[in-house]
Image (cartoon, grey):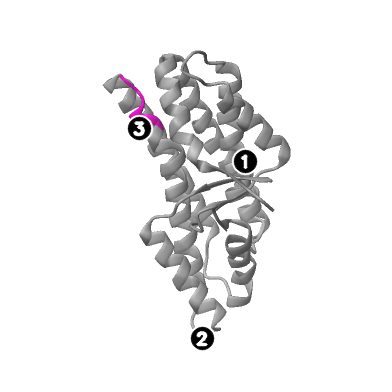
């Protein structure tokens, strides 16, 4: 069995994926870069929505909800700015590696045959995540293991959708050098969100949080 992380795309993102596939697979004589750029930005938005916006809903205190919302907004702006810098008017042949990465390594069908945007987890990451969620039960919560699972989830998602994806882009040295800096900033924001959130939550809240994230992890036969 293999473990995957993945979220169900919105109807808008599904339509964008289908349109990009149709245009590129049919070798339509149009510029590919607008489709790649818009698709990438939409995936980033929905990834952040799924990973972080749900955190706000489990915070019981309105003031802390507002503080968390500001952190999420900062992460969204940083991600959008990075992609705006990196995604340019590339030639069609230079778009293909990005498209192939998104199509072949960033999407899969779950056990119900539904498309998900995500990727296969390494055995080590899957073990850490599974142990963390197993450590959250109505009777007991091991916060150390659960936090490790959430941090691992964030790290593998950032590594896949930022580090690995940007390896497919044709970039100069200056733009490529900006990627690890931006990734570190996004990672810092996500860690700040977790460190502010987890100590506030009682065991019931941590169980709600775990319940929110569990459906993103899929076990499939290879």
Lower sequence index among marks 3 and 1: 3
Q: Is residue 59 magenta?
A: yes
Residue at position x 48%, y 40% in the image: 215
Judged from the image, the secondary structure of the residue bearing numbered disc 1 is helix
Whether the residues at callouts 2 and 1 have beta carbons within 8 Å, the answer is no
The span picked out in magenta is 55-60
Measure the C-alpha gap from mark 3 to mark 1.
Answer: 23 Å
Which mark identifies residue 69? 3
Task: Tell me: residue 61, above or below residue 124.
Answer: above
Judged from the image, the secondary structure of the residue bearing numbered disc 2 is loop
How many marks are shown on the rendered structure?
3
For this orientation, the residue located farthest to the left is 62
Q: Indicate the position of residue 147 as horizontal and vertical percent values.
A: 56, 23
Residue at position x 59%, y 70% in the image: 95
Q: Is residue 74 magenta?
A: no
Residue at position x 61%, y 21% in the image: 145
For this orientation, the residue located farthest to the bottom is 29
Q: Quadrant of residue 159?
A: top right
Lower sequence index among marks 2 and 1: 2
Q: Residues within 10 Å of mark 2 (few under 14, many from 20)?
A: few
Measure the C-alpha gap from mark 2 to mark 1.
Answer: 36 Å
Task: Tell me: residue 58, above or below residue 49.
Answer: above
**Label 2: which residue?**
29
Which mark identifies residue 156? 1
């Amino acid at each position: 069995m293999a473990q995957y992380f993945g979220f169900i795309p919105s109807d808008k993102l599904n339509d964008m994926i289908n349109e990009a596939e149709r245009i590129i697979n049919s070798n339509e004589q149009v510029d590919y870069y607008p489709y790649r750029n818009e698709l990438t930005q939409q995936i980033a938005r929905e990834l952040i929505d799924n990973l972080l916006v749900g955190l706000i809903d489990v915070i019981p205190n309105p003031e802390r909800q507002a503080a968390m919302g500001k952190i999420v907004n900062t992460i969204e702006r940083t991600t959008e700015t990075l992609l705006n810098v990196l995604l340019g008017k590339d030639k069609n042949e230079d778009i293909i590696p990005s498209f192939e990465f998104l199509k072949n390594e960033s999407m899969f069908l779950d056990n119900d045959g539904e498309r998900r945007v995500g990727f296969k987890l390494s055995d080590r990451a899957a073990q850490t995540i599974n142990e963390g969620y197993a450590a959250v039960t109505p009777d007991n919560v091991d916060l150390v293991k659960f936090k490790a699972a959430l941090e691992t989830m964030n790290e593998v998602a950032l590594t896949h959708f930022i580090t690995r994806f940007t390896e497919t882009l044709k970039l100069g040295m200056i733009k490529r050098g900006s990627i690890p800096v931006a990734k570190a900033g996004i990672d810092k924001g996500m860690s700040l969100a977790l460190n502010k959130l987890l100590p506030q939550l009682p065991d019931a809240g941590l169980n709600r949080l775990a319940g929110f994230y569990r459906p993103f992890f899929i076990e499939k036969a290879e």
